[in-house]
Image (spheres, grey):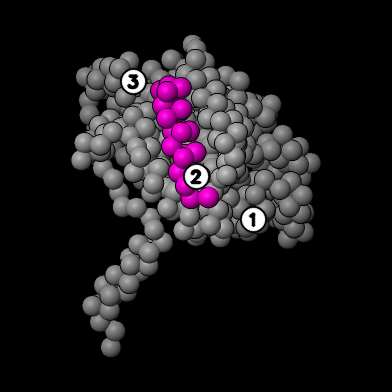
Amino acid sequence: MVTKQDFYGQLSHQLRELDQLGFPAERPLNSPQGPEIVLADGRRFVNLNSSNYLGLAANPEVVAAAKAGLDQWGFGIASARIFCGTQVVHHTLEKKISEFLHTEESILYNSCFDVNLGLFEALLSPEDAIIWDSHIHASSVDGIHLCPSKSFPYESNDMVSLKKALIQAEEAGARFKMIATDGVFSMDGIVADLKTICDLADHYQAIVMVDDSHATGVVGKTGRGSHEYCGVMDRVDVITSTLSKALGGASGGFASGRKEIIRTLRHLSHTSMSSNALTPVIAATAIKVIDMISQSNELQRRAVDGADYFRRQLRAAGFNALGQDIPIVPVILGEEKATMEMGRRIYERGVFITGIIFPFQPMGMGMVRTQITAGHTREHLDRAITIFTEVGKGLGIIK
Ligand SMILES: *Cc1c(COP(=O)(O)O)cnc(C)c1O
């Protein structure tokens, strides 16, 4: 007979295997999030590992807005939106998001993970089809699994493959078709080709869903996101995104787009209907954040320009540093063991990063994903570049 002990044995075995993949354990911070962080043992690091792109996670104005929001609205709401979980502050923020993104309406969730889990099933039926980029975020992959529609993945950001998938969906007799993509693929360092996606969507009469979690607030001329960057501000049907990255880094997500879509999510999306409303503290604070970034692009420019500088310097040193116009600089290091050793040595020298290898990356494509924020000074970046260069030379990754 299989025993309960076997279950724990199986978990332990799996945990040892995961350990062998070389992922470091959690390293608790003893400081707020920022360009420099302090660990529990007192060591100080330049931090290139957070999505705090605008540096607002511990910004004094943002913290003050959170305190005021707490005083005005209380700590929790203890109710789903439809019961008594909607406060004026939720509607104010939803309106602000719509204005910021140039969309018709918006709806808040507790996270973008929740949005993506609850969106597809609420909007589509078994007769319909989802045509999805193979590199979309895990939350959308899971959301698509929860949805009974036909499913057609395409090669990431490959427009020939997308076109084929659209034709396949049509041949399979799909009624409605929805294309799902991320706006920015953070591991690949690219912005999705939303212009071509929208053109193909028009031609094949498909609905376009873009998860812009890594772009909202920071990508595009005024930081509206990848739809602004690609010149398709009014052509995306629904954007999903997060408050947990550039927009303050606490938590919370939203969907924003065509009003029929947003209203349907309000009524039919399980992860909104059957979950507590977003805490009002976050809603009040996000209003402040959007006001700040609507008035000035300075933080956005600092993040993108800093990344541009960091990328150029790494390339000059011989690294394969990816990306353009985004605050993310993936650095491909190659072979798994060398990648993990490089990650470890850089970390030992005071730059907080994490090596990422198979199965999260293809074999031989080990990498570190560095993220530059508005709070990083040139001195921080120069220090990191020196360490990357010295360690990379020591390991023979660069010459
Ligand atoms: C971070 C991220 C999410 C999840 O956002 P949360 O609000 O933190 O749950 C979803 N999609 C993408 C593309 C992300 O990068």
At a point 69% along the width and 38% down the height, the residue shown is 193
Decide which of 21, 393 is in the foreground and name it.
Answer: 393
**Of pointers 2 and 1, the one earlier in the residue sequence:** 1
At a point 28% along the width and 88% down the height, the residue shown is 1
Give me the C-alpha separation between circle 2 and circle 3. Answer: 34 Å
Mark 1 touching mark 3, by CB under 8 A?
no
Q: Disc 1 designates what residue?
A: 153
What's the amino acid at mark 1? Pro
Q: Tell me the magenta residue range.
A: 375-396
Instruction: Look at the image and say whether residue 386 sits in the magenta stretch.
Output: yes
* SS for dot 1: strand
Q: Disc 2 designates what residue?
A: 392
Splitting the image into 4 quarters, where does residue 363 fall? bottom right
Q: Disc 3 designates what residue?
A: 59
Front disc: 1 or 3: 3
* SS for dot 2: helix
Mark 2 touching mark 1, by CB under 8 A?
no
**x then y, percent, for residue 36:** 33, 29
Splitting the image into 4 quarters, where does residue 308 fall? top right
**Of pointers 2 and 3, the one earlier in the residue sequence:** 3
What's the amino acid at mark 3? Asn
What's the amino acid at mark 2? Gly
**x then y, percent, for residue 245:** 43, 33
Using residue 16 as the reference point, say whether residue 52 is left or right of it.
Answer: right
Mark 3: is the Cβ under 8 angstroms from ligand 1?
no
**x then y, percent, for residue 181:** 60, 44
353 to 12, vertically: above or below: above
* SS for dot 3: loop
Give me the C-alpha separation between circle 1 and circle 3. Answer: 40 Å
Decide which of 224, 69 is in the foreground and name it.
Answer: 224
372 to 289, vertically: above or below: below
